[in-house]
Image (cartoon, rainbow, N blue to C red):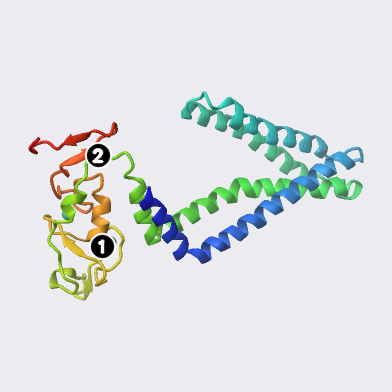
């Protein structure tokens, strides 16, 4: 867990600029949403009785009742006793009608001919709200996927995810990694030849940094792969195999506390 916190700090230190830009956008987005929903709601309250050629006021009414209440109820009241699958099915079942309601609203603002003149106070706030919902439904998941890909390709995230993926893992051999033979920076075995004969320094397969930092120990596994010692030790906290070729690196460390906290003696070790 400490390792995880350190990774979080390293991540925010290294990516403070994109993170703060994302944060500013998030704040602007929340304020914008709040403003648009509030203005549509007040339009519904104050201007529903003026003439409009499409039943936009009923759309707004349904949208507010349906989109605000049921999902909140589901999220807070109905779900604690449900399994994850049932909850997922329920959320999908709730999503479908909200999609249909949105299509209905979109067709109303598209086919309306006179409402923008007879009742602009209702028409424009309603149209803004409908466009916002369309944007949220289409663009927000897309943006989330894109930013996830960008973040995952950044180096610290790989280490971060490796650490996360280790919770609840099996026996490890981090102790044995401390005794693996060290390879000096600049050693010929750390140079690899590219397809066109050009030489380059190998990278640590875990953090993807070049194996050229004199401040970090480099080790060679029995299978002949090279890593930063600290990267491999983290990987081996709950694993025994090489992340590149899956060959076994070492026998499990002798004492591995199991979930009850009692020490397990590794197979083959002296009791
Ligand atoms: Zn590394
Ligand atoms: Zn290997």
Residue at 64% over, 33% down: 72
* Camera-side residue of 192 and 271: 271
In 3D space, how far apart are the residues under numbered discs 2 and 1 (Cα atoms)?
23 Å
- Residue 4: horizontal and vertical position, in percent? 39, 51
Q: Quadrant of residue 48?
A: top right
* Camera-side residue of 215 and 137: 215
- Residue 21: horizontal and vertical position, in percent? 57, 63
Left or right: where 260 falls relative to 38: left
Which residue in the protein does label 2 denote? 170
- Residue 88: horizontal and vertical position, in percent? 51, 31
Residue at 91% over, 46% down: 118
Within the displayed image, which quadrant is ligand 1 positioned in? bottom left
* Camera-side residue of 194 and 252: 252
Left or right: where 220 falls relative to 169: left
Category of crowding for the residue at label 2, using alpha-carbon neighbours closer than 10 angstroms: few (below 14), some (14–19), many (at least 20): some
Where does the C terminus fall, quadrant-wise?
Answer: top left
Does label 2 point to a residue whose CB lies under 8 Å from ligand 2?
A: no
Does label 1 point to a residue whose CB lies under 8 Å from ligand 1?
A: yes
Q: Is residue 50 above or below residue 14?
A: above
Residue at 72% over, 43% down: 106
Q: Nearer the viewer, mark 2 or mark 1?
A: 2
Q: Secondary structure at mark 2?
A: loop
Which residue in the protein does label 1 denote? 204
């Amino acid at each position: 867990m400490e390792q995880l916190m350190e990774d979080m700090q390293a991540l925010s230190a290294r990516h403070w600029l994109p993170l703060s830009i994302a944060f500013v956008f998030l704040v602007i987005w929340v304020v914008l949403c709040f403003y648009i929903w509030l203005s549509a709601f007040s339009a519904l309250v104050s201007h529903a009785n003026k003439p409009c050629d499409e039943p936009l006021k009923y759309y707004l009414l349904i949208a507010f009742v349906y989109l605000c209440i049921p999902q909140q109820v589901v999220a807070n009241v109905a779900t604690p006793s449900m399994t994850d699958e049932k909850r997922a099915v329920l959320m999908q079942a709730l999503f479908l009608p909200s999609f249909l309601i949105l299509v209905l609203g979109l067709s109303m603002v598209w086919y309306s001919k006179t409402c923008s003149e007879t009742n602009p106070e209702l028409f424009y706030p309603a149209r803004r709200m409908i466009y916002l919902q369309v944007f949220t439904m289409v663009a927000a998941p897309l943006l989330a996927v894109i930013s996830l890909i960008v973040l995952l390709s950044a180096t610290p995230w790989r280490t971060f995810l490796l650490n996360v993926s280790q919770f609840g893992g099996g026996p490890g051999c981090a102790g044995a990694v401390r005794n693996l033979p060290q390879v000096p920076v600049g050693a010929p075995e750390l140079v690899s030849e590219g397809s066109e004969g050009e030489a380059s320094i190998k990278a640590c397969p875990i953090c993807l940094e070049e194996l050229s930092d004199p401040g970090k120990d480099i080790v060679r596994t029995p299978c002949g792969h090279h890593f930063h010692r600290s990267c491999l030790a983290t990987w081996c906290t709950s694993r025994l195999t090489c992340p590149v070729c899956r060959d076994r690196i070492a026998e499990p460390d002798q004492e591995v506390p199991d979930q009850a906290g009692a020490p397990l003696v590794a197979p083959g070790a002296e009791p």
